[in-house]
Amino acid sequence: MVQLTINGKQIEAPEGTTVLRAAESAGIKIPTLCDHKQLTPFGGCRLCIIEVQGFRVPIAACTLPVSNGMVVNTETEALKKSRKFILSMLFSERNHFCPFCQVSGGDCELQNAAYHEEMTSWPMQPGWNKFKVDTSHPYYVLDNNRCILCRRCVRACGELVGNFTLAVAERGASSMIVADYDVPLGESSCVKCGTCVQVCPTGALIDRSSAYQGHIESMKDIRSTCTGCSVGCTTTLRVRDNRVVRILGDWDGGVNRGLMCEVGRYKLLNDQRPRLTTPMLRKNGKLEPVSWDEALGAVADKLKPLAGKNAVAAVASTRLTAEALTSFKELFAEHLGGTTVTTLEEGINTAVLGEVAAELGSFEGKIDVLRNADTVLVFGENLVRNHMVAGFMVKRALPKGARLISVDGEASDLDELADIALKPAAGSLTALVKGLSAVVVKEGLGRTELKLACPEKVIEKAVKTSGVPADKLAEAARTLAHAVSPVILIGTGVTSQRDAEAIKAMIELAKLVGAVDSERVGLLALKGKSNSVTAAQLGLDGPFAINGQKVVFAALGDDVIPEPVAAKLAKAPYLVIQSAYATPLLDKAEVVLPAALWSEQEGHYVNLDGRVQKAVKAVRPPEGPRENAAVLGEIALRMNMPVKKDWHTELKERKSSVVLSGI
């Protein structure tokens, strides 16, 4: 640790820490604009200048490492004067008209920095720029007239997301932020994650949904968990007047550290499907609005006589909370004795993992291993489009020298990014994986022992079966074996095949090349939606089929029904739908129960690497819809079959492929 003094206060900081971070840790505020804790120090705005004893001139705190005995002053009169001058120059360079700015609600860092220096005006006239405002993007607006050229957006797009869409064009006073080769932002390679908007300190990048929504002091920030997919990003929901105005990534989030994708940041907030707000019951061939009492009574009366007769089938969304899924299973599988009680995913992304875990125990690691991986082998997943935050972790490492190997029989966006892209024939994955291991064994590159009587024959079979050339197979194997911190990702294209032998072969390969050892587990499977792991732990991972059942209950929540399941539900003799949104299946339903959205209910989720996290109720639902768990509990009570099981306990009843943490 390093000892230093800041403003007369003695503090300690780890070696290599910047003065800015050391001051922050001690509660000392140093103003800054270009700095961001998740980005490499830049030293561009010079607002964080400090005086250091022994230094001839002030220096930027964001790039200066601490040293033993360092004496720092951050608030001298000379520094305040310099900061006011810097801010005056920034305000005069472009058109910063705070009263008319969409984000002038307390979260503009330029405006806040001026207030910190007690500025209410600036002495120089603006440059009266006339940069074209780019409104082509569906989620945000780029206005270079309000840009201070801190390059936070450019750096975040590259350093955090690995997309490198944004750059700076022109020079001097004409400098401006552009997308790709100066194309409209909405037509660029932007992946719509919104990271650039969140890091922008001014109104240069404007979030369409939250613009002109009021002062930040009139809003409440609620820390929650994204329910978009199984990555389980930590989020901050900005709420005003019982409405989620904006979704932000939490920079301290354990899984994502501020990153979010289009689904979690924008699509959840802008779902345009018609909302269900009133219970409905089919009368005389037509769905009619009824009271909750009548609707729940009709469901209970229909279900209770069928208990123990295997006459009820049920399917639930893997976006429901752990509490709701536990009640769902207890009610339909245990109390009513249904043998077809599963989820919309039908265990496609988890069933085979559970099968292997039952035999071998937990074998997966944490997503954090991607942060330091120097080689990543991805089996059967398009990380550019699916599980995008995990994809960002991989993409951003590539310019730093990390190697990417993609194995996918389908066309994938990863093909363009990968150093090696293997395209095996359908049904040949197990042979291919064993072939990779055989190359490692043959060339003596393994870090553990794997006995193979004749590696050459295994390699020959892999080449013949998969259609992958022998030289490509060998190149991939050598690249993986020579890695210092390799990681193997198992995609949904693999788990959907339900091939346990292929999963075991991947575990064997991971151990052989050092991806899995006593110190780290660099093997992870990418699951489906937000509570896929919970559903798997509860045994809700079987196929869905209607085999003579008289009633089918579909607890959809705010999910979208996969077409194969929707086709089966359409044939149900008596269908009960519990849903937040209207679906085409309403025409087939006998009873409709309006459900709460993700933001209107509270509960727990288990992400893809086993972290148990809580989603917080941010807003009240409109009059009518009720929380999914509450609806299931009420139906059970009306049948004198109360649901009492504890979800914590139920999660542990089955061996898991991931180590569950946080229970």
Image (spheres, rainbow, N blue to C red):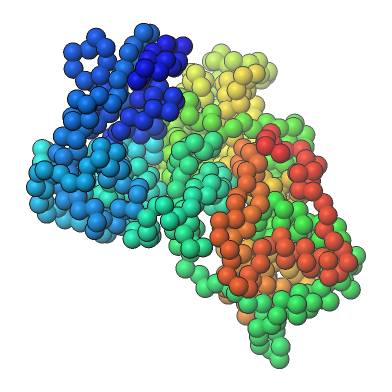
Question: In the picture provided, is 163 more to the left or to the right than 11?
Answer: left
Q: Quadrant of the C terminus?
A: top right
Residue pushed farthest bottom?
284
Question: In the picture provided, is 373 more to the left or to the right than 580?
Answer: left
How many numbered marks are there? 0
Q: Is residue 617 visible?
A: yes
Q: Residue at x 22, y 26 (%)?
A: 77
Q: Residue at x 51, y 22 (%)?
A: 485
Q: Position of residue 422 (x, y in %)?
A: 47, 36
Q: Is residue 460 above or below residue 587?
A: above
Q: Position of residue 1 (x, y in %)?
A: 46, 11
Q: Position of residue 571 (x, y in %)?
A: 70, 74
Q: Nearer the viewer, residue 513 or 179?
A: 179
Q: Is residue 192 above or below residue 608?
A: below
Q: Position of residue 219 (x, y in %)?
A: 45, 55
Q: Is residue 497 visible?
A: no
Q: Is residue 455 above or below residue 630?
A: above
Q: Residue at x 51, y 38 (%)?
A: 253
Q: Residue at x 88, y 67 (%)?
A: 640
Question: In the picture provided, is 122 more to the left or to the right than 352?
Answer: left
Residue 431 lies in what quarter of the image? top right
Q: Nearer the viewer, residue 365 or 448?
A: 365
Question: In the picture provided, is 35 more to the left or to the right than 172?
Answer: right
Residue 358 lies in what quarter of the image? top right
